[in-house]
Image: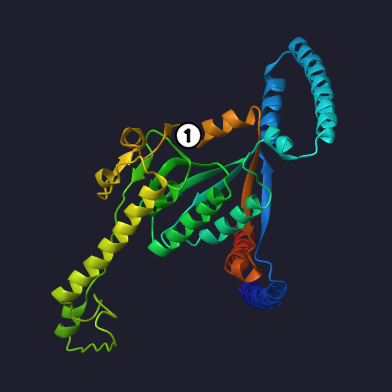
Amino acid sequence: MEFLYEYGLFLAKTITFIIAFVIILALAASAKKGKSGKKGELEVTNLTERFNQTKSALENELLDKEALKLKEKQDKAQAKSKAKEEKQKAKAAAKQKSDESTNQAQKRVFVIDFKGSVDAHEVDGLREEISAVLAVATPADEVLIKLESGGGVVHGYGLAASQLARIKAKQIPLTIAIDKVAASGGYMMACVADKIISAPFAIVGSIGVIAQLPNFNKVLKNNNIEFEQITAGEFKRTLTMFGENTDKAREKFKSELEEIHHLFVAHISEFRNELNVEKVATGEHWMGSQALSLGLVDELKTSDDYIFEQVADTQVFQIKYKINKGVMDKLPFAASSTIENIFMRLYNKVSELKFR
C-alpha cells in the first residue's frame, strides 16, 4: 500500500507537469499562429492519376503472368504512341500564336465537396476553394460541386449561392451533384448550376422558409418574474422568447418570412427559368427521380458515376481547403489522451502487483 501511495503521488505530480507543459506549448503555438495569420492550406489531388493507379494495381493482381506480360507490352506501346502524339501536339502548339485553342484541347474538371451545416460556416472554406479554381480555370474547364445540405440560415446559404455564382460569372460550366440531400438552402445553392445531377433517392426541394422559437412568458409569470424589453422602432423586435407576443407581432413576423420566400422563389426563377417554380415552392421535398420529372434536376446519376466518366479522357482534380487546427484546438483531445494513457499504465501496473 505504501508503494501505491508513493506511486500515486508521483503520478499526480507527473500529470500536473505534463498538463502545464502542454498548455505552455499551446499558448506559444497559438501566439505564433496569430503572427503568421495562416488559417489553412489548399490540398489538390489528381483523381485521374489515382484512378489509373488503382486500376493498374487491381489488374496486376487479377491477371496471370502471361496476360500481365502481354499487358505490359501493350502499355509500353501505348505509352510510346502517346508520347509521340504529345510531342507532335507540342510542336503544333508552339507554332500557334494564341493559347486559346490549346486550353480548349486540355479540359480539366475541378471537384469541390460542400457539406453544409445549419449555420453554413463551411462557406469560408468554399470561398477559398472557388477563388483558387478561378485563378486557373478557363471556360474550357468545368467545376463539379458535390453538394450535401439540408439547409440552414438564410444569410449563410445566400452567401454560399453567391460564391457559386462567381463561377457562372466567369462563364465556367458548373455542375452540381446531389448524392444525399440538397434541400431548402441546399437547393438555393444547387439551382445556380448549369446542370444538376441527382441520385435517385436523394432528397431535393423544400423550397420554403421556416422559423420557430419557444416562449417562456407564462413560466415567468407563474414564478412572479418580470421581463422588460425596451426597443426604439415599432418592429425592432417582433416575436420574443420571454415577453408576451401579440397578434400584430406575429403578423409582422410572418410577413417577413413571406418576403424571404418570395426572394427565394425569384432566385430560383433567375437560374432555372424553365422550371414551374410556383408548383414546387410549397416547402415540400421529393426524391431524385420525382425531382427529375418536376424539373428540379436534369439527370439521375451519382457523383461517382459522373467522375468515373470524366477520368477516362480528362484530368480531374479534387480541391480542398483544409483549415489548420492550432494546438489550442487539439489541446482537449491531447490532454485526455495523455491522461488516459497514464491511467491505463497505472491500471496495468496495479494488475501486475495483484497477480504476483
Q: How many marks?
A: 1
Name the residue: 84% across, 35% down: 94
Q: Is residue 172 left or right of residue 83?
A: left
Hey, which quadrant is residue 241 in on the image? bottom left
Task: Label 1, secondary structure: give it.
Answer: loop
Residue 200 seen: yes
Q: Is residue 326 left or right of residue 263?
A: right
Q: Is residue 175 left or right of residue 22?
A: left
Name the residue: 28% across, 49% down: 281
Name the residue: 71% across, 25% down: 56
Q: Residues within 10 Å of mark 1 (few under 14, many from 20)?
A: some
**Considering the image in quadrants, where does the C terminus appear?**
bottom right
Residue 335 seen: no
Hey, which quadrant is residue 253 in on the image? bottom left
- Name the residue beneath numbered marker 1: 302
- Above-or-below relation of 245 to 160: below
